[in-house]
Amino acid sequence: MRTFIGIDLGSTTTKAVVIDEARNVLGRGITNSRSNYDTAAAIAKQEALVNARFHLFREALSRSGALNGALEDFLAQLERDFRLEQFLEQLGDLEATCLRNAEGTRFGEAAKGVALALEKLFALLKAEAPEQFAPGAKRKSDFFRDIAGSRYLAVGEQVAKDAGVRYDMLLNVFDRSIIEVENRVYGESIKRHLLAALDRSFGFLKTAPATRDAVRAPIQGMLDTALEETYVVGTGYGRARLPFSKEHVRSEILCHGLGAHVMFPHTATVLDIGGQDTKAIQVDPKGIVESFQMNDRCAAGCGRYLGYIADEMNMGLHELGPLAMKSTKTVRINSTCTVFAGAELRDRLSLGEKREDIMAGLHRAIILRAMSILARSGGIRDQFTFTGGVAKNEAAVKALMELVRENYGEVTLNINPDSIYTGALGGATFAWRAVTEEGKTAEKREETREKAAQ
Amino acid sequence: MTLKDIVDRCEALFEDTRFGAVRDWKAAAPGRKAIGYMPIYVPRELIHAAGMLPVGIFGGGDQLEVIQGDAYYQSYICRIPRSTLELGLTGRLDCLDGLLFPSICDVIRNLSGMWQVLFKDKYVKYLDLPQNYDDATGGSFYVREMQALREDLARLAGREISDAALNASIAVYNENRKAIRELYAYRAQKPWQAPTSEVYLVLRAGCVLPPEEHTRLVRAYLAAADAQQRPRRDNARVVLTGSFCEQPPLGLIKSIEIAGCYVVDDDFQLIQSWLLDEVPADGDPLQELSKAFLHRSASTASKYDEKKADKGQFLLRQVKTRGAEGVIFAAPSFCDPALLERPMLQEILARHGIPYTAFKYAENTGQMAPIREQAGTFADSIKLWSAA
Amino acid sequence: MSMSANPSGTTPVRMMPSSAAPKKPAAPVQKEDAMWLQKELVNGNYTELANARQLGKKVSATFVPGNLNELLMCFDFARSLPETNALQNGMRKKSGKMIMDAERDGHSEDVCTYVKADLGMMLQGQVGPTGEALPTPDVLLLSYTGCFTFMKWFELVRQKYDCETVMLHVPYQGEGHVTQSMRDYVVKQLKENVIPTLERVSGVRFDIDRLRQYMRESAKAEEDLVWTLQSAKRKPSPIDGYFGAVYYIGPIFTAFRGTPEATKFYATLRAEIEQRIRDGKGPITPEGEMPEEKYRLVVEGPPNWTSFREFWKMFYDEGAVVVASTYSKVGGVYDFGFRHDPDHPLESLAEYCLGCYTNLNFPQRIDMICKYMDEYQADGLLINSIKSCNSFSAGQLLILREVEKRTGKPAAFIESDLVDPRYFSAANIKNRLESYFQMIKQKRTAAGAH
Amino acid sequence: MTCTVGIDIGSGVVKTVLFDGERWLARRCERIRKRDNLQLARAGYDEVLEEAGLKPADVAYVATTGEGENVPFATGHFYSMTTHARGAIFLNPEARAVVDIGALNGRAIYVDERGKVLAYKMTSQCASGSGQFLENIARYLGVAVEEIGPLSQAARAPEKISSICAVLAETDVINMVSRGIPTADILKGIHVSMASRLVKLLKVTGITRGTVLLTGGLALDAGLLKALQEELVNEKIAGLAAMNHPDSIYAGAIGAALWGAFRHDRLQELQSRAAA
Ligand SMILES: Nc1ncnc2c1ncn2[C@@H]1O[C@H](COP(=O)(O)OP(=O)(O)O)[C@@H](O)[C@H]1O
Ligand SMILES: Nc1ncnc2c1ncn2[C@@H]1O[C@H](COP(=O)(O)OP(=O)(O)O)[C@@H](O)[C@H]1O
Ligand code: SF4
Ligand code: SF4
Ligand code: SF4
């Protein structure tokens, strides 16, 4: 089937969205942006295509009615098992890379001890992996680097102590190995993982053999259907580095405007807070951008700020919002300089302020900056759509709602759970338009490159 | 009133970004008007003589959340214009019937035009100040500027402003200036009795109170402060300079004191002390005000020094007469006048062997650790080596 | 802010000759004339400055906005313009080091980089942009039209070199017009302070008829300059009113206004543009003819000098032409009728100073831009906000809002600096410009569709 | 004997030293790593006493420095530039300038032969040249702190970081990695940027000749030292020679202990004078 893909190469995350000819969203994929933009784009796209297949399974299975009623549970389990398969492969890869990196003279006499400790450590990690993907388990992040990293650090401290090697050494091996592993594209193993996951799920859910076949057939069918990448549009901060020609690249402003319009057709004002920039965009009823403003060269108060704070607090990004929601008192934070965020935090803590109150203050400070950029672009008009990674953060959303009400009265605020994909959705829509409205075809050169990446 | 009452009252006035005191004053009698002014070199006597309340606007401090103001200013421009705009755009300055912008820098100058665009129904005046100090040239230009202001204010007030009324106002402000001079002299003598964080607040109350009341308040503070014995610390005596326009947060002033410095002279909100002595209250009032500005006013980075030899003389005099051991240059970030002036003054201090240190702030600076470290090291070096 | 006669830096010649369309070999002679003249003017000035001491000439320094070139010529000064030196050093990529040196000498990172580039040049031994040493000025004529930083700048120079300084305080048009009181004040200062000081320093007696004669020349050149800048009202525009205009305003904004050479330069320039119009050509760029005019813009704010070429390229690569700019008015606003008037020499000098772009108040600046948007049929306004320059930058975002509101045309905002290479982020600016152009295009397609 | 303790609470590390006059008795150095710095200070204090076999009553003066203004058992506090200056003179009596690179700010201090601070300058708010930044980038590049120096020294074509902002500089680095710039060249690039800032600070203090001693944790980073030495040559201030000392990280704590002793004597003297 023909698909249209948008890839948004952001400063912190890379997102991809796949849509079909009827402009239905088939799949979404995300990965952290990394040093190699090609890889990041390839991985995000691959994730989106995997996600699209799950979407197609759902459609096929609900048509066949093989699971009547248990479909959602089954698919959720299948997805978890699929992730687990992926995770285990990457973990194995990481182990091999770590061992290789621990060799040689770098650690001198300690090298042996480090290797032993690593084996011990990875055995533990593998053993606990299924637990992390069990139903209801909470993960710190969706990215391998973060999941594996946080467990590695947690388990590693004890292992190091027991093995009598320096914890620093284990950290060091991890730091240098993770980059190699996360830059690997596991395209060829998807099918294998899916089939393995299917067996796992059947086992876990104790599916009856007859049902197994009824389920396996449509899934196998879908796996064999080719997803044709009819047209790809790239956008985002790193778009200039995408291996696309100019024809296939759109400014992220246009993509965010259009994406928000597609999600919420009555959108007039769009706020996007990404990793390194904050954008305020005004769109007309057709999704066409009328004006936009971005933060100036200072990166204060953007998403990365939360990243620094999370590092400083030794927490996951997902956890910041919930902590701030516990606040009972407002602490005013004036500087949103990302670099000094940690210092400000320590300063406040030493003055006896509570962590949750400081966190709430930090979130408000970010949103205050965003409010200024919105005001710069012409203010907030009804309806107002909040997109970008920070829209996932409930404390940021709360602060935004308060400030919008204080400054503009009642305004409809749209937030889509998939708001981080807004730019990519806009890109995919542009791709669709290019083919269906402008009659364009993808360029040969690019097609072959895309294939190679797959 | 006890010392605490006075300081608390001043602090409440200082923290009130809605200018309740001004609103109350206007509500007390029908038809009263208030005219705001931005930093330094404003002949408040004219406003007072028109029967109006002069109100000093020094930005929003560190408690005001600035949204709209930031929408109009890039990150490399100082804070005071943006928080002032915020005050205006959020209706906090509705109690003012007009706003004066004296000529001290490009930022304030441009703000005057922005005010004209954004607040079309308010009286706005850009008050040019001569950089030529000849009575017949710069002086007559300044008198004409003041005359234009006088006529505008008369129109607003619906009555003429007579010379007699002006002279009476000059006398009122002479009293106020005198009280403030006494306060500064007292602090220089016993800085532990009148900490700068308090003196600052008392001074700041003068921005929103009628001058007569403020004079009484200053005197009351002086009496109360002197009546209470406070511990004297082993602190270094410093002159603080560069803060004539955008004001540092109170926490910063406190931090300097905590770090071991007694501020014995400063140029905070200079409007309160820019005229150095009495203005004759029995002559041609505009001429006298002009002469006072041209020949007997505090110098700042916004005023031209006619000769190389004039540069820094005012600061040197402050150091000498107040018995200071060093100078702290505390200027607002991105303040071109203060920051361009600084190297010249430093060179002169160095020539006279007067130690100095320098840092920048913003009215909403939240992090005091670097400030304490720099002020503290400065105090340490003066203290540890003073006897050596 | 200021101007240069030759901002193309070290390779000025590539500029104008490229206008010579390969197919029409007859035209280039005149164009090379203009170029040759301009280059000769600039180099001649630096040589004159370098040799001023030997020639027994006194040296003056003054600023571009509100410069009293005709008056200074009456006293035979060799004329230096520190802003021009700074920008020339910027284009030759020398300013970064000078700024760092000034900062090491105690200057704040926050303040105007023109000042720091100038002071940094002094610290490096006063070697000018062309490699010739510049003399210490004998007099600093401090007319601080439109900017307070000028005042500090010359105080700093005086502190270092102990030069004689003479202040000409030009009041600001706070209420949007020039009053008699302002005019009187400026004229009085000219008579009582400026002229006597210049006489004393130069040893030359003031001759008002000489002044009148220079002003007659000025007015002629001004006429041709205005014609050239206004030629951009045509579609397609034969010139670029920002990047290109920087070359055109060079002589008249600096040491040449009032000289017959300048008059000749502008006559030659005009003839050239007339030819371009006859040939139906668009502006020339460093890479040759501009193929198609896709976007017409008005620009507010000075350009960036350290990456001038790269910056310009971002425009012509996308087919964007600047049809009018406020920067091409910093050294004098002539397009609303003002000309130097030999019949009222001192009053006319006062009028000139009072009318410079940065001496206008905000309502005036906004009116002027809206007028340009309309008369030059622009698609939008672009603001290049300069970190250094409060005089331009403080409040530009209000200009943006108001112009958008009044004209209904989209505006965009980018940031850079004049001569500090640290503040030119090419990726950042390109990103915004691309988004802006794509937005205009999208709007246009949408408008065409209904 | 006059025993004094100096405690330097940094943003990354707590350093504690015990002195008897000018004689070094014990030392402790503990990374904070999200722990409570006041508790670490207390632990360090207890440990140095234990090592020297002393009781709290034997200590004449406990001096804090750094972020230690709130240590309840301290006798007095000195500000960090005061203490680094004194500590540097103790470690190397030739030192006339001290460059201290902490986790967030860099400082240049001009001192005389007695450790008196003549002038100083700190980096301002916007700083990508901080220790923290270097550490973040090293982690991103997969390099251990100890390896930074040797790697940087092996660089061939250092890639300069132009951004003034650490966030944007981080992106610069990511771009460099994607362009295939070797790790060594990136690290050296950061070192060069930091060195250029530090030399700028030094120049502002007005010093022109003598020994510059690096203090603080980054003093041990040989790559930074080398970059600094090169930058001094580049900037033609050959009169300054930069070096470090194996105990550089303790400079602040040492200075605190020594100033503590000085103040102790002074106070005693005043007391006896008051008694008389
Ligand atoms: N679950 C989450 N909770 C809170 N913040 C998040 C979450 N996920 C992402 N973010 C924030 O979103 C930012 C990335 O947003 P994104 O729109 O992807 O930016 P970019 O396009 O610049 O990469 C991160 O810096 C992070 O602060
Ligand atoms: N051998 C080393 N090489 C490079 N950096 C080091 C080394 N040892 C410690 N550091 C760095 O020194 C820093 C701590 O220095 P310190 O001066 O104690 O800072 P602070 O006083 O701010 O805690 C840490 O950020 C650490 O990364
Ligand atoms: S260091 Fe902080 S203040 Fe400076 S540009 Fe970066 S985020 Fe902004
Ligand atoms: S702080 Fe300085 S630059 Fe800002 S408005 Fe005041 S004088 Fe002008
Ligand atoms: S502030 Fe602007 S006008 Fe003034 S000297 Fe600097 S660049 Fe020129």
Image (tube, coloured by chain):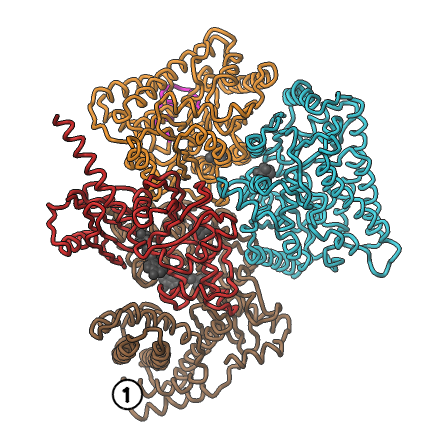
Observer-nearest residue: B102 or D116? D116
The tint of chain D in the picture is red
Q: Residues within 10 Å of mark 1 (few under 14, many from 20)?
A: few
The tint of chain C in the picture is cyan
Height in image: A187 above or below D88?
Answer: below
Question: The numbered mark 1 sits on a residue in which chain?
Answer: A
Image quarter in which the C terminus of chain C is found: bottom right
- Residue B67 is left or right of residue A121, and the answer is right
Q: Position of residue A234 (x, y in %)?
A: 54, 68
Q: Position of residue C150 (x, y in %)?
A: 59, 33
Task: Note the chain letter of the orange one.
Answer: B
The tint of chain A in the picture is brown
Kind of residue at badge 1 = Gly
Residue range of the region highlighted in magenta in the rendering: B19-34
Could you say whether the residue bearing mark 1 is in a helix, strand or loop? helix
Examine the structure image and report whether residue D253 is included in the region drawn in magenta: no
